[in-house]
């Protein structure tokens, strides 16, 4: 309102200016974090905040993209045309393991079926699960490769190339967990030294995958599998104290490593076996003396052992149906069995087919 010659005059203010004046730009919600959806939430941080009254201003310059809604009523195509899925699965689980890689290439439903636990648990429950033998090869250049042998159909199948860190590694451990996963762990890289790395090959995906690294770097160690858990103990590592006493266990279900009780003395194991639920190790101590220890998983304890089984145990051995068998000659064609009654390796099994150049170790 203005006064001209003592007479008041009123100028009309355009409507657009009135609209602009109603917006407090310093308190507009357009300038506040989009995560604060209500005025009450904004008032905690900016007092006097008002809702934006300009209809042409969007509350966010990055509007959220609406996800396409899935039609739950969509009917999936059957696994096998003309058959219900339960009968189709009953047919597919009887396909030999050597052909599973081809089955995964048919369609997405078949791939998901063969990549899950349900398919292989059915095969195991029906007693038709097949076991393969994994063989490691090293060429003249020192490169590592793995092959799988099917003892039923007498067929060999090459595995995909191993990860780069294990192509030239040595003194690492290997074990099969969950019936279809081949694990490689630890070892020594020619350049970087001892490793904590853990990788595994899955027969379900026909690929190598990473697993959780070990807690300690180590190579030339002892390892075993008890109740589908991987145990690692002793070995060597770079540093002032090369021989290790530490031990750890890996649970594949949790993908987690955990320390267990340390060994009584540091050891570099060269033979080991699981017998009657206990883990026996024999190796060399820090002063190159021969040591033997036994681990009991139920009570998580180590102890020295010097009975007849350990004293006569000099070569790699294995257990079959609760009986111990060990190599007894350089050719690897003669076996000894452990007699628990007498506590000695008294029985011998000779194939009488001796071949020179066998890699069987004998101390």
Image (cartoon, rainbow, N blue to C red):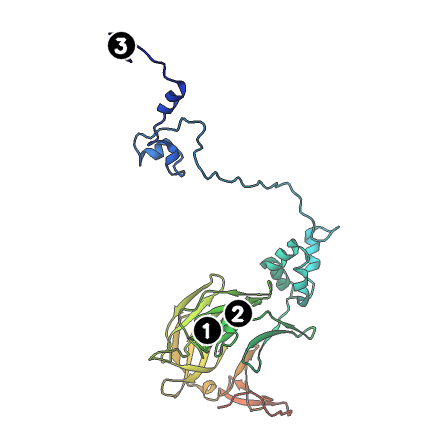
- Please name whichever residue, 153 or 347, is drawn nearer the observer in this view of the structure: 153
* Quarter location, residue 134: bottom right
Q: Residue furthest right?
A: 82
**Mark 1, mark 3: which one is toward the viewer?**
3
Q: Which label sits on residue 4? A: 3
Contact between labelled residues 3 and 1, with CB atoms less than 8 Å apart = no
Q: Position of residue 202 (x, y in %)?
A: 57, 65
**Image position of 245 with respect to 63: above or below:** below
Q: Secondary structure at mark 1?
A: loop
| Cα distance in 3D space between marks 3 and 2 | 91 Å
Q: Of helix, strand and loop, which one carries label 3?
A: strand
Q: Position of residue 12 (x, y in %)?
A: 36, 14
Q: Is residue 160 above or below residue 54?
A: below
- Residue carrying label 1: 186
Q: Position of residue 221 (x, y in %)?
A: 44, 78
Q: What is the distance, in whole Å, between disc 1 and disc 3 at their CAs?
A: 96 Å
Residue under numbered circle 2: 163
* Residue ID at (62%, 64%): 124
């Amino acid at each position: 309102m203005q006064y001209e010659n003592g007479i008041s005059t009123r100028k009309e203010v355009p409507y657009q200016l009135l609209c602009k004046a109603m917006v407090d730009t310093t308190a507009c919600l357009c300038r506040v974090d989009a995560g604060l959806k209500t005025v009450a939430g904004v008032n905690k941080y900016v007092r006097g905040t008002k809702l934006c009254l300009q209809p042409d201003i969007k509350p966010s310059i990055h509007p959220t993209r609406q996800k396409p809604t899935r039609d739950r009523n969509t009917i999936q195509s059957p696994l096998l045309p003309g058959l219900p899925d339960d009968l189709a699965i009953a047919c597919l689980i009887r396909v030999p393991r050597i052909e599973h890689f081809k089955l995964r290439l048919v369609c997405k439903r078949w791939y998901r079926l063969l990549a899950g636990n349900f398919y292989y648990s059915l095969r195991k429950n029906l007693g038709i699960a097949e076991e393969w033998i994994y063989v490691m090869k090293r060429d003249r250049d020192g490169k590592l490769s793995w092959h799988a042998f099917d003892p039923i159909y007498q067929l060999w199948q090459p595995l995909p190339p191993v990860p780069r860190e294990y192509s030239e590694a040595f003194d690492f451990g290997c074990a099969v967990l969950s019936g279809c996963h081949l694990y490689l762990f630890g070892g020594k890289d020619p350049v970087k030294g001892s490793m904590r790395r853990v990788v595994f090959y899955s027969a379900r995906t026909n690929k190598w995958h990473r697993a959780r690294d070990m807690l300690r770097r180590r190579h030339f160690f002892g390892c075993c599998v008890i109740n589908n858990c991987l145990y690692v103990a002793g070995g060597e590592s770079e540093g002032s104290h090369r021989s290790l006493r530490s031990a750890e266990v890996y649970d594949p279900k949790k993908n987690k490593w955990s320390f267990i009780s340390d060994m009584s003395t540091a050891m570099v194991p060269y033979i080991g076996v699981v017998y009657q639920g206990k883990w026996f190790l024999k190796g060399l101590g820090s002063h190159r003396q021969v040591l033997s220890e036994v681990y009991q998983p139920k009570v998580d304890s180590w102890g020295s052992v010097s009975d007849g089984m350990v004293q006569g145990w000099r070569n790699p051995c294995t257990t079959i149906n609760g009986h111990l068998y060990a190599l007894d000659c350089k050719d690897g064609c003669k076996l000894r069995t452990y007699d628990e009654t007498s506590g000695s390796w008294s029985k011998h099994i000779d194939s009488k087919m001796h071949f020179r150049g066998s890699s069987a170790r004998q101390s």
